[in-house]
Image (cartoon, helix red, strand yellow):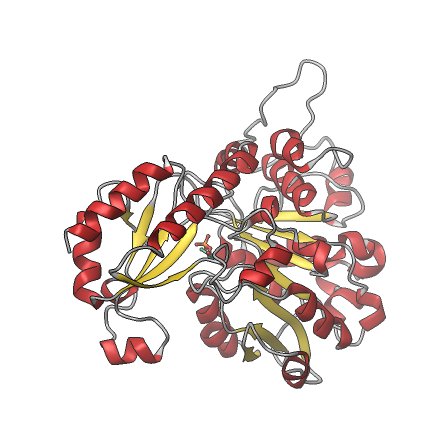
């Protein structure tokens, strides 16, 4: 499939049926796989042969879909996980253990921030957060001798900052570590971080990739470009024998192209077991088949709604990197030339009360904690995810009480704008 263009890969990547085989990806609804001899199965356990033995480690349905995502991102190997949280945890923990250190952009998804700042700290991993707008000097100053990875989000959820992927990759590589980029919001349709120097790409497939609010899931893609052996002292898990796998050295046996995903499957899936169900992988693939068509419309609707909001008296600020007035416009022109995603955030002058009234009066946009769905949805952090905080605390955290995150779906943009108009009039 590598010879085809992205739109074709969305539709037909990952799975090519043989003569008389199912046209659609089969759901292999089986926990286990049958072998004729113990010797056959032994080869799989020793990673001497590739094949399936237990769905906690690998399943054909998942592998077809992971292969499609790898093709879309331009990577050499990929795996599906049960959620985006599991994808980011596995991607980091695969190379950073107790005693290690991660440099991360501070502008990331709340769940990932918590994973790093609370749970991974409890595991003995140190984190240094840097601004997504850090200069090269500021980035370089964040590294320590025990740094194992740099992390950021292409378009951050919910702040909508745009990551300078090339700069973050340059700093990571200067210190002999990979850059891991969560590419959930733009998807590979609008940005392929590997082309800008990222080494590992992660996804919450729950968002645009599924796109229909149907299945929670995640994915990890390896670019196959990072030379683990050249930095063997930093990555003993990949570059020294794994005694729990009969002394295999992943980076030697599977090379740059396969070591990272093989280790994450053989060790982390085996021990932590956050596999995506084959049924959910099937739903995910249905979403991927139209991803290129949907992303264009999401971005178009986001642009139309953002532009309309800038004309409204009751709105004090609109954040959307497709607006010329946006802080990230220039960077988005470089990394997201065809648009980013459909998520817009804006601030109502009337604060918390106005936001509450506005959202109550929306007819098409539903109040949800979800984003990146075919159906438009919205959230006011002050009255939902952050409702325990006072207006003063919210302002200090950079989340004004009147802030609304609006995830533009695939409806007619004119209907979305009419809906916003009538809800603003009701305030
Ligand atoms: C939602 C989200 C996650 C977490 O994904 P889940 O599938 O909900 O576990 C991670 N990163 C980003 C950017 C997200 O939007």
Let me know if residue 90 appears in the view: no
Position of 404 with respect to 409 (left or right) is left
Relative side of 234 to 420, left or right: right
Specify the quadrant of the image occupied by residue 237. Answer: bottom right
Q: 186 and 222: which one is in front?
A: 186
Q: Position of residue 153 (x, y in %)?
A: 55, 62
Residue 261 % position (x, y): 69, 53
At x 69%, y 61%, the residue is 198
Residue placed furthest toward the top: 20
For image coordinates 26% across by 47% down, the residue present is 420
Quadrant including the N terminus = top right
Name above or below for residue 86 compared with residue 287: below
Image location of residue 145, percent across then percent down: 71, 85
Q: Is residue 165 visible?
A: yes
Please give the count of numbered marks on the rendered protein: 0
**Residue drawn where x is 48% and y is 40% of the image:** 210
Residue 66, by quadrant, is: top right
Q: In which quarter of the image is residue 379?
A: bottom left
Residue 79 at what x, y percent from top left? 63, 48
The answer to whether residue 33 is above or below residue 120 is above
Quarter that holds the C terminus: bottom left
**Camera-nearest residue between 65 and 266:** 65
Up/down of 185 relative to 142, above or below: above
């Amino acid at each position: 499939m590598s010879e085809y263009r992205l739109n074709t890969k969305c539709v037909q990547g990952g799975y090519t049926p043989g003569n008389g085989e199912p046209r659609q990806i089969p759901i292999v609804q089986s926990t286990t796989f049958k072998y004729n001899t113990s010797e056959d199965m032994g080869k799989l356990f020793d990673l001497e042969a590739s094949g399936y033995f237990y769905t906690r480690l690998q399943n054909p349905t998942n592998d077809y879909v992971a292969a499609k995502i790898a093709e879309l991102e331009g990577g050499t190997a990929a795996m599906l996980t049960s959620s985006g949280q599991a994808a980011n945890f596995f991607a980091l923990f695969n190379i950073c253990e107790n005693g290690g250190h991660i440099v991360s952009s501070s502008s990331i998804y709340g769940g990932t921030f918590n994973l790093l700042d609370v749970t991974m700290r409890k595991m003995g991993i140190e984190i240094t957060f840097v601004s997504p707008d850090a200069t090269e000097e500021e980035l370089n100053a964040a590294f320590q001798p025990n740094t194992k990875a740099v992390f950021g989000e292409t378009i951050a959820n919910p702040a909508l900052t745009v990551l300078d992927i090339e700069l973050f990759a340059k700093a990571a590589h200067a210190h002999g570590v990979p850059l891991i980029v969560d590419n959930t919001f733009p998807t590979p349709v609008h940005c392929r971080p590997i082309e800008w120097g990222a080494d590992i790409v992660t996804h919450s497939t729950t968002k645009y990739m599924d796109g229909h609010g149907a299945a929670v899931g995640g994915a990890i893609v390896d670019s196959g470009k990072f030379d683990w052996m050249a930095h063997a002292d930093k990555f003993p898990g990949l570059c020294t024998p794994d005694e729990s796998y009969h002394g295999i050295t992943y980076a030697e046996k599977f090379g740059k192209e396969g070591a990272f995903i093989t280790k994450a499957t053989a060790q982390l899936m085996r021990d932590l077991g956050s596999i995506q169900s084959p049924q959910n992988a099937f739903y995910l693939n249905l979403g991927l088949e139209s991803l290129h068509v949907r992303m264009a419309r999401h971005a178009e609707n986001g642009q139309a709604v953002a532009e309309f909001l800038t004309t409204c008296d009751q709105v004090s600020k609109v954040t959307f990197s497709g607006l010329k007035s946006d802080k990230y416009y220039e960077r988005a022109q470089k990394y997201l030339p065809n648009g980013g995603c459909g998520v817009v955030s804006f601030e109502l002058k009337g604060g918390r009360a106005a936001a509450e009234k506005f959202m109550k009066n929306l007819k098409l946009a539903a109040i949800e904690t979800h984003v990146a769905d075919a159906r438009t949805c919205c959230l006011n952090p002050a009255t939902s995810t952050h409702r325990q905080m006072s207006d003063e605390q919210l302002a200090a955290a950079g989340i004004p009480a009147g802030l609304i995150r609006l995830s533009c779906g695939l409806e007619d943009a004119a209907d979305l704008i009419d809906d916003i108009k009538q809800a603003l009039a009701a305030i």
